[in-house]
């Protein structure tokens, strides 16, 4: 798994590439712990390059969501493939995680317009 960080229009974005499995989950956990310590108001994971997530990867995502809730941070996934979406749906995580088709959709849902 590889990660790349961006900041764009009030959102901090982690672009992920590869599989999120038992071998990579500790690395993702470290990356997300850094984000939690930074208390990111909005963190979006771009899953365009992710083709598989196992139970350890799912647990890592849930762990971050709980940490973010503690400081009022928003968290979302974007560009989730149909294959990975099926995994989230099977374990009903799509009911727990905010998943948007695009970055623009996530921005519209997570970032309040000025004066709102």
Image (cartoon, rainbow, N blue to C red):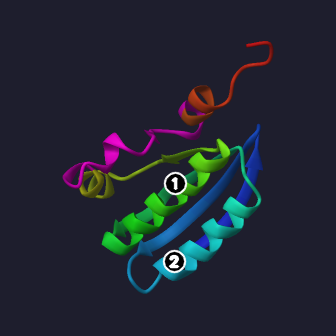
Disc on res. 21? none
Q: In this view, does 109 lie above or below 48?
A: above
Question: Residue at position x 49%, y 62% from top?
Answer: 63
Figure label count: 2
Compare residues 29 and 20 and report the one nearer the observer. Answer: 29
Q: Quadrant of the C terminus?
A: top right
Give the residues drawn in magenta, as a range. 89-105
In this picture, residue 112 sits left or right of residue 2: right
Residue 14 location, x and y as percent? 63, 59
Residue 77 location, x and y as percent? 49, 48
Cβ–Cβ under 8 Å for marks 2 and 1 = no
* For marks 2 and 1 on the same chain, the one whose residue lies earlier in the sequence: 2
Question: Residue at position x 46%, y 68% from top?
Answer: 60
From the image, state whether disc 2 or disc 1 is nearer to you.
1
In this picture, residue 20 sits left or right of residue 7: left
**Residue 96 visible from this viewpoint:** yes
**Residue 54 visible from this viewpoint:** no
Disc on res. 1? 2
Element carrying mark 1: helix
Disc on res. 66? 1
Judged from this view, the residue extending furthest toward the left is 90
Q: Residue 101: say if magenta.
A: yes
Residue 12 location, x and y as percent? 71, 50
The CA span between labels 2 and 1 is 23 Å
Element carrying mark 2: loop
| Residue neighbourhood size for the residue with mark 2, other residues' Cα within 10 Å, grouped as few (<14), some (14–19), many (≥20) | some
Q: Quadrant of residue 20?
A: bottom left
Judged from this view, the residue extending furthest toward the right is 115
């Amino acid at each position: 798994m590889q990660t790349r960080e961006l900041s764009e229009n009030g959102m901090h974005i982690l672009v992920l590439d590869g599989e999120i499995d038992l071998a990579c989950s500790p690395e993702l956990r470290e990356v997300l712990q850094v984000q939690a310590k930074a208390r990111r108001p909005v963190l979006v994971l771009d899953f365009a390059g992710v083709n598989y997530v196992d139970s350890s990867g799912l647990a890592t995502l849930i762990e971050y969501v709980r940490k973010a809730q503690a400081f009022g941070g928003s968290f979302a996934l974007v560009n989730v493939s149909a294959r990975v979406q099926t995994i989230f749906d099977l374990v009903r995580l799509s009911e727990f995680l905010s998943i948007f088709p695009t970055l623009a959709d996530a921005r519209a849902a997570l970032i309040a317009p000025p004066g709102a």
